[in-house]
Image (spheres, rainbow, N blue to C red):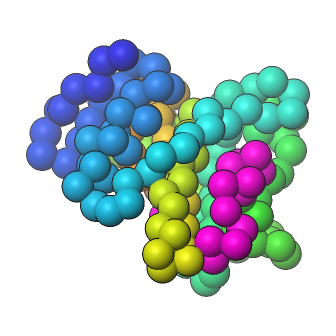
Amino acid sequence: MALRQRDEETWLGSSQADIRDLFKLKYKVCKPSPSDFVDVRCGCGSDSFHLYVDDEPPSAVRVCRSCSAEHAICESVVDFEVNEMGKAECECCCEEFEITVGIAINAAKNQSAIFVGCRCKECGIVGLWGKWKVRHSSNRNLLSRA
Ligand SMILES: [Zn+2]
Ligand SMILES: [Zn+2]
């Protein structure tokens, strides 16, 4: 693993595992920090996706680069049209990402937070593209639907 800092705001990773390191680095000071993670794979086995994000509701949809399957990450949205969402694009103009999803569970507040991290397939920049809160009752089973 080799997460390295390029400048104040930019981190570069050499593998998908570095997305987890970014979570640990950036969110270890917030409580709770993400405790469980999933390296997302499409049903077809691909680890390469286009990502679409929205604020209303906060959500993220991944589209497989290999088989074109569309999937709402952690059931964040039910009815969606990817063309109406914002397409994630790296500063290098690449739109192809590895995706790792983390969950932080706050039992006291009956709340969890979902984190969607990406690593650019082209230049290796790792970053957080989505973060939203869910009721704790939905809990970590959500990760199985990342
Ligand atoms: Zn696929
Ligand atoms: Zn890039």
Residue displayed at 61% across by 33% down: 39
Position of 105 compared to 73: left or right?
left
Position of 101 compared to 66: left or right?
left
- Number of marks in picture: 0
Q: Residue furthest front?
A: 108
Q: Residue furthest left?
A: 8
Q: Is 30 rendered above or below residue 89?
A: below
145 magenta-colored: yes
Q: State which quarter of the image contains the N terminus.
A: top left
Position of 124 compared to 11: left or right?
right
Q: Is 127 rendered above or below residue 81?
A: above
Q: Position of residue 17 (x, y in %)?
A: 47, 25
Q: Position of residue 132 (x, y in %)?
A: 52, 70
Q: Position of residue 63 (x, y in %)?
A: 75, 47
Any part of residue 54 in sight: no
Residue displayed at 75% across by 26% down: 46
Any part of residue 109 in sight: yes
Q: Position of residue 85 (x, y in %)?
A: 65, 69
Residue displayed at 18% across by 32% down: 5
Position of 70 compared to 127: left or right?
right
> What residue range appears in magenta?
131-146
Q: Is 132 rendered above or below residue 24?
A: below
Residue displayed at 86% across by 44% down: 69
122 magenta-colored: no
Q: Quadrant of residue 23?
A: top left
